[in-house]
Amino acid sequence: MAGKRTVHVRRVYEDPERGDGARVLVDRIWPRGMSKERARLDEWCKQVAPSTELRKWYGHDPDRFEEFGHRYRAELKDDPERADALAHLRDLARDRPLTLLTATKDPAISEAEVLAGLLRK
C-alpha cells in the first residue's frame, strides 16, 4: 500500500512514545548528559548528520534555516556516505513509523526536520 511514511521528529531528552516505531538519533555528536539506556535508541545514524562546517555556519539561527535546508539537502545528495545513510533511513521508514531524534533545543529548525521532510515524500 503506497502512502506517506510516518516520520516523527522529537528531542532525544523526551520520553519515548507508543507510536515512535524505530528511534534513530541523527546528530553527529552524542547528546550531553544522556545515557545510552535513557535514550532508548534503536540506532545512532551519525553518518546522515550535516558536516561540521555546515552545522557551525548554521548555529541554529532561525533566519538561516531555509538556506541551511538547501545546503544540507545538497550534502545529502552529493556525499555518498550521507546518501547511503538517508537511503537506510528510508528503508527503516518503509514498513513502520520512524522517529528521528535530535538534541537541539528546537527540533522544528533542525537537521532532523529537514530529513523528515525528505523521508515523508
Image (cartoon, rainbow, N blue to C red):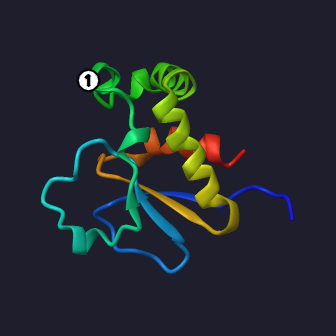
Q: Classify residue 57 by image quadrant.
A: top left
Residue sticking out furthest to the left: 33
Residue nearest the observer in this picture, 103 or 119: 119
User: Is the residue 96 above or below the residue 51 in the image?
Assistant: below
Q: What residue appears at the point 36 percent right and 67 percent down from the top-left corner?
A: 41
Q: What residue appears at the point 56 percent right and 50 percent down from the top-left corner?
A: 88
Q: Residues within 10 Å of mark 1 (few under 14, many from 20)?
A: few
User: Is the residue 5 above or below the residue 79 in the image?
Assistant: below
Residue sticking out furthest to the bottom: 18
User: Is the residue 40 above or below the residue 66 in the image?
Assistant: below
Position of residue 20 in the picture relative to residue 31 (left or right): right
Q: Classify residue 46 by image quadrant.
A: top left
Q: Secondary structure at mark 1?
A: helix
Residue placed under numbered mark 1 in the picture: 56
Q: What's the residue type where badge 1 is placed?
A: Lys
| Residue 27 in the image, given as x and y percentages of width and height | 33, 45
| Residue 13 in the image, given as x and y percentages of width and height | 28, 63
Quadrant holding the C terminus: top right
Residue nearest the observer in this picture, 41 or 57: 41
| Residue 54 in the image, given as x and y percentages of width and height | 35, 22
Position of residue 77 in the picture relative to residue 14 (left or right): right
Whether residue 28 is visible, yes or no, is yes
Q: What residue appears at the point 61 percent right and 42 percent down from the top-left corner?
A: 117
Q: What residue appears at the point 85 percent right and 59 percent down from the top-left corner?
A: 2
Whether residue 110 is visible, yes or no, is no
Q: Classify residue 38 by image quadrant.
A: bottom left
Quadrant holding the N terminus: bottom right
